[in-house]
Amino acid sequence: MENKIPDFLLERTSSETYARVRGKLKTSFIEKSIYHLADVIRTGYVQWETASRNDFLQKVDARVKVLFLLFYAVIISLKRDLVSESLIGSFIFLLAVISRLDIIVLYRRVIFWSFIFGFLIAFPSAFNIITQGEIIVPVARFSKSYSFWIYHVPQEIGITRQGMLGVLMLTSRVMNSLALSFLVLSTTSLPEIVRALKVLRVPDSFLMIIALSYKYIFIFARTVEDLYLAKKSRLAVQASNAEARRWIAGRIAFIFRKTRLRCEEIFKAMLSRGFADTVRIYRFRRLTALDWSTGICFFIIGILFLWI
Amino acid sequence: MHIPDGYLSPQTYVPLYGASFVFWSIALKKLKKELSTKHVPYLAMAAAFSFLIQMFNIPIPGGTTGHAVGAGIIALLLGPWTAVIAVSVVLIIQAIVFGDGGITAIGANCFNMAVVIPFVSYGVFRLMSGNSKSGKRVSIAAFLSGYAGLTLSAFVTGLQFGIQPMIATGADGRPLYAPYPLEVALPAMVLEHLLLFGIVEGVVTVLLLRYFLKNETDMIYALSVKGS
């Protein structure tokens, strides 16, 4: 489905116009921060947009989805073979398709992070220096083996079958966990997820803290972005790194002061609306037939995954 | 530093959820008692600040930039118990919204970054600064507090990774979770923080503390507690 947010708003423009000079400030700290902040704001809006559609998982109650997320995250962490992980991965993919999510966007993100956190980090462990076993890809051979303190380098170095299986297992587990998280995140807005955490008996005040801070993270992220844009627009000559660090320290302190002030304002607003020391999250709507049937299906399929 | 799903076995992430839960409960109870009705907006804004601190990319010598975790400076500015809740909320939001850190690893991540860093940083600062309220000694204490907090947190994370091949292996002996043994995981995690990230964290902590010392000393919890 076409995203409702216009494409030009999702585009990332680059305006890195300053030259690299040794010992002098590059604008990269400004660019990186603006990019980082824009990404935070963008992620929040895109998530809200995909979650507000009227497709399969979007229609399911957030409590069912939160329990599904936790149950399946545990199942993924418990499975010890590639076949089970592949089946779980296919099930998550199917759910993403019937929820009409943008599969390319979703899986590009999943594959990228799985490659970094799963494959790339774990790959060196496939060698027999880390994981002993049957060598399937010999890489190097020395005249003798070497030992240094607690470390041992064998005469022949290579990728072992056991090591490679371990890497693939870890990568598929990371990939399934990420796909599962992104699936639920793309079909549920954070305020709904936070409210749904009540089924896990998380105290209302803690949920309120999460919901409130989430809202203000976006408000302050805009403020910080404006600070950087203002700095960038005023930067006619290069500044030293030390000067940049002093400026950043000042801006962080400014944000700190702003959060303290906002805390007072929010508290006064809460009092003016009759807040009397009891945080109470509103009651949930009744679960529909779709919620129950989806929840039961997820539970049965989960048990099957645990059993196989 | 954020541990993704799949690296920790249930034998590790379940107890760490429990440990974090204990700290969250104590922190919430303590802060509710101290702040009364104001604790919700106070902690929410502390969490927002904790998130935003990570948005500032700071130029570091060598031509690159880095950002701080910020848990140490938050412990100095707002107190370690406030930092426990503020940083935990940030880690939960990061895991839920941005996919930074796993769902099963939320307990472990909160323990490593929202419990270890604030208490170590706060403890080191109080110990090193002694009775001083300004000057070189406080700056050194601030640097060491940021440095030690992050490095010890990396040590604890490395320990959690390193014990996985001992406690969770398949029938053929292959590790089922984080594959590196202690002798690899621990130096890998600790060395990079000892030599680089710890220094960045220390520098950010000094920079911010010095700014507050110069302009708003009364806003620093670690110094106001000392004075009372």
Image (cartoon, coloured by chain):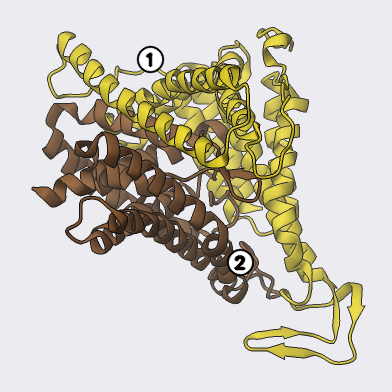
Chain colours: A yellow, B brown
Q: Report the chain holding disc 2.
A: B
- Image position, residue B137 (x, y; %): 29, 59
**SS label for mark 1:** loop
Q: Position of B184 compared to B76: left or right?
A: right
**Mark 2: few/some/many CA within 10 Å (<14, 14-19, 20+):** some
Please, what is the three-letter code of the amino acid marked with disc 2?
A: Ala
Q: Is residue A72 visible?
A: no
Q: Which mark is residue B188?
A: 2
Between A109 and A17, the residue placed more toward the observer is A17
**SS label for mark 2:** helix
Q: Quarter of the image for the N terminus of chain A: give it.
A: top right
Please, what is the three-letter code of the amino acid marked with disc 1?
A: Arg
Say how many tags the image has: 2
| Residue drawn at x 68%, y 56% as measured from the top left | A170
Q: Position of A68 compared to A112: left or right?
A: left
Is residue A63 depicted above or below A286 in this figure? below
Tell us which disc is closer to us: 2 or 1.
2
Is residue B100 depicted above or below A138 in this figure? above
To which residue does mark 1 refer? Answer: A285
Q: Residue furthest bottom?
A: A144
Q: Report the chain holding disc 1.
A: A
Is residue B123 depicted above or below B21 in this figure? below
